[in-house]
Amino acid sequence: MTGPVDLVIGVLALQGDVREHLRVLAECGVTARPVRRPTEVDGVDALVIPGGESTTMSRLAVEFGVLEPIRSRLKAGMPAYGSCAGMIMLATEILDGRPDQESFGGIEMTVRRNAFGRQVDSFEAPVQLDGVPGGPLHAVFIRAPWVERVGPEVEVLGQVEDGAAAGRIVAVRQGNLLATAFHPELTGDTRVHRLFVEIARGAAD
Ligand code: GLN
């Protein structure tokens, strides 16, 4: 084959900031489309899981019949990127979730929902990401989770740098799966999405 692979990246469109992710992906030069049905899950090369509310996303994933299809595609190696609630959806274990809350899994980690607490519900901080040149990202956290435990296959890409939460893990990668506790789709900085597109292209080659 000649030329770049014509990649289609889906954005899980059950709930959350779907449009923002679609816009950034388009800016990165890939075809991006919303995904909410099992056949649409089959039709994409990679999947972005947006920020929003993981308990709602979990319930809707069951209702729309995409929980198992997404789980099995992730097991088969489909690249995925989750921001905030999307990070929670990619975790194998959730703390402070609802008892009936499901996740897709894929990244062997324990995340704590709303981990930064009430006082610092939402905040912004610079986060340096491994593998992302150009200086720290301006990370926007909105009722964000953090990662409390990672499995041996998980690479820690970024941590909070100072303040009470210094050292907390907020960006990880396991193989073709990427997750951030913050929302790069809200800042106009396309570097995290470009990293994900690179991962997805690598997997499609
Ligand atoms: N607190 C939300 C949850 O538990 C995540 C918030 C977000 O995605 N901005 O799903």
Image (cartoon, rainbow, N blue to C red):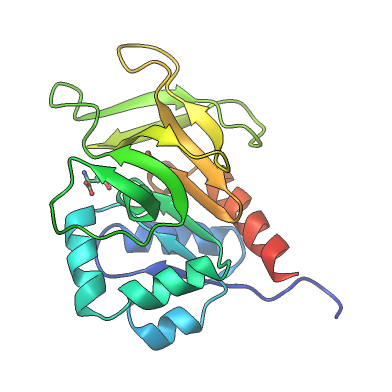
Q: Is residue 37 above or below residue 141?
A: below
- Tell me if residue 34 can be seen: no
Q: Residue furthest bottom?
A: 39
Q: Quadrant of the C terminus?
A: bottom right
Horizontal side of residue 96 vs 181, given as left or right: left
How far across and how far down the image is residue 142, in percent? 26, 37
Q: Residue furthest right?
A: 2
Question: Which residue: 62% across, 32% down?
Answer: 130
* Count of numbered labels shown in the rendering: 0
How far across and how far down the image is residue 63, in percent? 19, 78
- Quarter of the image for residue 49 reads bottom left
Q: Is residue 141 above or below residue 31?
A: above
Question: Which residue: 51% across, 30% down?
Answer: 158
Q: Quadrant of the N terminus?
A: bottom right
Question: Which residue: 62% across, 64% down?
Answer: 29
How far across and how far down the image is residue 28, in percent? 59, 58
Nearer the observer, 74 or 34: 74
Q: Residue furthest front?
A: 152
- Tell me if residue 52 can be seen: yes
Nearer the observer, 101 or 166: 101
Question: Which residue: 33% across, 45% down?
Answer: 84
Horizontal side of residue 196 vs 56, given as left or right: right
Q: Residue furthest top?
A: 163
